[in-house]
Image: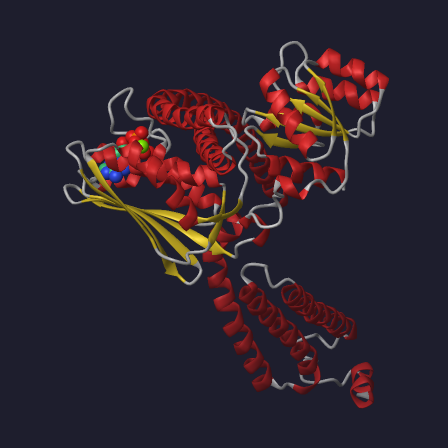
Amino acid sequence: MLESARAFFAGDYAPHGYCLLWQPELIWTHVVSDALIAASYFSIPIALVTFVRKRPDVEFGKMFWLFALFILSCGLTHVMGIWNLWHGDYAAEATIKAITAIASVPTAILLWPLLPRALAIPSPSMLQKKNDELAAALAERDSALEQLRGEVAQRERAEAALVQANKMEAVGQLTGGIAHDFNNLLQAISGNLELIQMAPDNRDKVVRWAGNAAQATERGARLTGQLLTFSRRQRLEATAVDVGGLLHDMSDFLRNSVGPTIELDVEIAPGLGAVRSDATQLELAILNLAINSRDAMPQGGRLLVQAATDAPDRIAVRIVDEGVGMTPEVVERALEPFFTTKGPGRGTGLGLSMAYGVARAAGGDLRIDSEPGKGTTVTLYLPREEIIRSAAGTGREKSPRDGPARLTDILLVDDDREVRQTIADMLRKQGHQVTEAENGPQALLELERWSPSLLLLDFAMPGMNGAQVAATALEMRPDVKLLFLTGYSDSEAIDRAVDGRVRILKKPVSAGALAAAIDALID
Ligand code: ADP
Ligand code: MG
């Protein structure tokens, strides 16, 4: 190097001395310029490669590498330019030029087709604009959704109103049947009471007659329970329901409902166990399905209601008829609320959808198998659950003879004199102190004078209703316990009125249930 430098300044440099007019300044200019260009050409590919390696998302990454190679070889040609001022290594220079050509031609060719694609890459400002458009579209969609929600809510309100109307219609249909049943029950009760009046001294017989009358009352209570389900929106009370027992208890009622032209068989497999459902609603679902079958067999026929174990953890309740059956189109829509093929005033279109709702609420499902002319099988699949022991009725309901755990001062408010006296007698028999009031204002007068431990309240009373009495009573005597007795199923209204802080007993109430409720409250 030193050698070359000396030659360079001495003027006897070769081989370019001649071409460069033996002027050191020209050679100097070439060397420095080539060196600077080469240095720049070497730095640019490093920058390019670093860029594509750090940004793998960048499009045309390969192009960057090709470009880097091209610039690198350009740099090398300039290095060769310096080298050859002294060495004349033209073969090496040619090789490097050839490599540069090989790198440059594809780079140049490839660049053109890429141009439109490169132009199509959105700029940050274009991206921002697209983003804004998207945000606007989203906002629009949100407001549309909001509107849709409003419409859905409106539709739900309309549907609820329609359900209510349809229920009222169904009450009309049921009333005839129930009135008939009720007259029979009243006959049984009044007949037995008359027998007691005629022979009050025959102890054994009196006990039997009283038992008969009490049994008839129980059946009456079940019937009114069914009626009330139609007339009001009843609170769903999921408990362990013994399916076999339920079907057994309702089979007479089913028979009455489908009428004498239909031969009803009820088959209950032994040891079915319980499901988690609302007993009244489940009964109503089965009743609805049986009535559908009756409607499908206008000339009469056979109807089978069957409860069996379907899988170890599942009970299947099947309602099988040999009626007109359904086309696939009807099967498809049958579960829709308000879908009916029956004439106006005949069908509500709610039977199957209600039954489906009950099955779903119990964690199960409903299935329809039907063909036109071949009859229909509707199956309720209900997951089994362990029977809750207390629900079987042992222990919880005390017989009146057991007496209360603790004697209590009770203020009893009921506007119906007979009901009030009967209940007061029951309570006194259980050893409680009972004071009677026949309406709200009278009860509040009593409360001013003394503090009972328990206020037993009828709900529906003229003037002040039970909830209003309760609210004032709690202000006067915050410690008083409350127990409602109501003949209505609309316990929700009571809950709303008094915050669900109280217990509610449904009339008719047995002495045992009354004692159990009071025990639970006082303990
Ligand atoms: P509704 O009985 O008031 O019409 P449902 O929801 O109970 O309403 O039934 C809907 C429709 O499904 C009925 O109108 C009827 O066409 C059809 N359907 C239901 N059960 C049966 C059945 N057992 N046999 C034939 N068709 C039935
Ligand atoms: Mg129906």
User: Where 260 falls versus 90 (above or below)?
Assistant: above
Q: Who is closer to the viewer here, 241 or 217?
A: 217
Q: Is residue 195 left or right of residue 54?
A: left
Q: Residue furthest front?
A: 201
Q: Who is closer to the viewer here, 184 or 19?
A: 184
Q: Is residue 478 left or right of residue 484?
A: right
Q: Dividing the image into four quarters, tell me where ligand 1 lies.
A: top left
User: Where 373 falls versus 471 (above or below)?
Assistant: below
Residue depicted at x 56% and y 76%:
97
Residue depicted at x 61% and y 35%:
511
Q: Is residue 284 left or right of residue 489?
A: left
Choose top left, top right, bottom left or bottom right for residue 40. bottom right
Q: Is residue 334 visible?
A: no
Horizontal and vertical percent for residue 313?
Answer: 44, 60
Residue depicted at x 66% and y 40%:
516
Horizontal and vertical percent for residue 424?
Answer: 66, 25
Choose top left, top right, bottom left or bottom right for residue 427. top right
